[in-house]
Amino acid sequence: MILISIDDHIIEPPDMFDRHMPAKYKDQAPKLVSNPDGPDQWIFQGEATGTAGLSAVVSLPKEEWGFDPTDISQMRPGCYDIDERVKDMDANGLLAGMNFPTFAGFAGSHIAKAPDKELAAVTIAAWNDWAVDEIAGENPGRFIPMGILPHFDMDATVKEVYRIAAKGCKAVSVPEAPYGIGLPSFASGHWDPMFAALLDTGMIPCMHIGGAFGLIQRPTDVPPLPDDIIIMAPQVMAVTTTDIILGGLLQRFPDLKFALSEGGIGWVSFYLDRLDRHVTNHAWTHLDKLPAGKTPTEVWREHFLACFITDPTALQVRERVGVESLAWECDYPHSDCTWPNSPELLWNELQAAGCTDAEIDMITWQNVARFFDYDPFAAIAKDQATVGALRARATKAGVDTSETTKAQYSARYSELVGA
């Protein structure tokens, strides 16, 4: 197999802004500081911003797993050190990945909400330079470059789209339900200049679960549970898809495409059955919001790419969903990820579903390459891009994938810092 993941996460390292923040603003860049009452925190414009290590539990024993932030000193180096990440990708047989932010917010929303918007825009641009120039640029063929945008200012957003597109960026992370974080909806027209710029540059908007959770009212008499966020991801992704399909957006931009991240695919077949019937049975409602002459299923297959970590039942009905609209994700370094055994787990599901070799190639890399206009073999020959070839590199490099505790990582980190 050849594996490309379109949903992984990077834990931003403490020095990430040193090389990318303009000199004028360098002393105002976000800083990772020690917190005597808990995990280290990123401080930006005088306030704690986001979380430094959200659910970064890869390789920890399960009794140490949690949704809470983890100090960089207590996590696997591949979470924050890009050279170590590449080694971990090799060990998992993963050719390429797409990394969403952590402390910045999955769509940059944590930085964007800071009061000084000029400084926020500069910081977002610095994050993009780090992600596109350093992470992707210095590791050819291993990362699909993705950026974030200053969505509080549409003129600045459009300028940043063109700026990072010129660097070779392939995608941007966009709030999946902007009205869930106090911004106008996609139906409002507010975002149209951004979508026009993305179409003009060939970049893909990626919708990662996050902001839409605020739309779902949960019981107030008990504390919110991490289970809610993990289990209800498909429900919030269905909300996003409904907003896009029935909001008139694809009438205004008939060539626009969307990648959906971490919502799985198990909900899609039911959703399409329901929506197809709805627009014929209730034609007096939102039928006029669909692209002319197309059913919801046709719209889905032409405009969406959804990814899954493990969805054995959904793979059984892949033809209903459309094999061309399916992709895979690893979700490194979160608790949902399947590292370092992703190839075995994915292979078993694909085989159990009776997928053909052609379908496996579509799901594991071809759909992604087509959707993002990404050549996975431009820098790495195809015969060196397979699970077997990459794992052979990891074996030669002595990559250790064994379970390691937070205390063990902390001791190693102290030695490294001391050295």
Image (cartoon, rainbow, N blue to C red):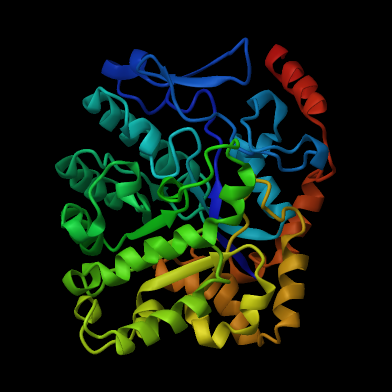
Using the image, determine if residue 193 lies above or below residue 285: above
| Left or right: residue 295 compared with residue 376 | left
Using the image, determine if residue 121 lies above or below residue 248: above
Residue 1 in sight here: no
Residue at horizontal 67 percent and vertical 52 percent from the top = 336
| Left or right: residue 38 compared with residue 285 | right
Quarter of the figure with residue 260: bottom left
Location of residue 412 in the rendering, given as x and y in whole percent from the top left corner: 78, 23
Which quadrant is the N terminus positioned in? bottom right
Which quadrant is the C terminus positioned in? top right
What residue occupies the far front of the structure in this picture?
221
Using the image, determine if residue 116 lies above or below residue 305: above
Residue at horizontal 32 percent and vertical 88 percent from the top = 281
Location of residue 163 in the rendering, given as x and y in whole percent from the top left corner: 25, 45
| Left or right: residue 319 compared with residue 155 | right
Residue at horizontal 76 percent and vertical 51 percent from the top = 394
Residue 253 in sight here: yes
Quarter of the figure with residue 305: bottom left
Location of residue 142 in the rendering, given as x and y in whole percent from the top left corner: 55, 54
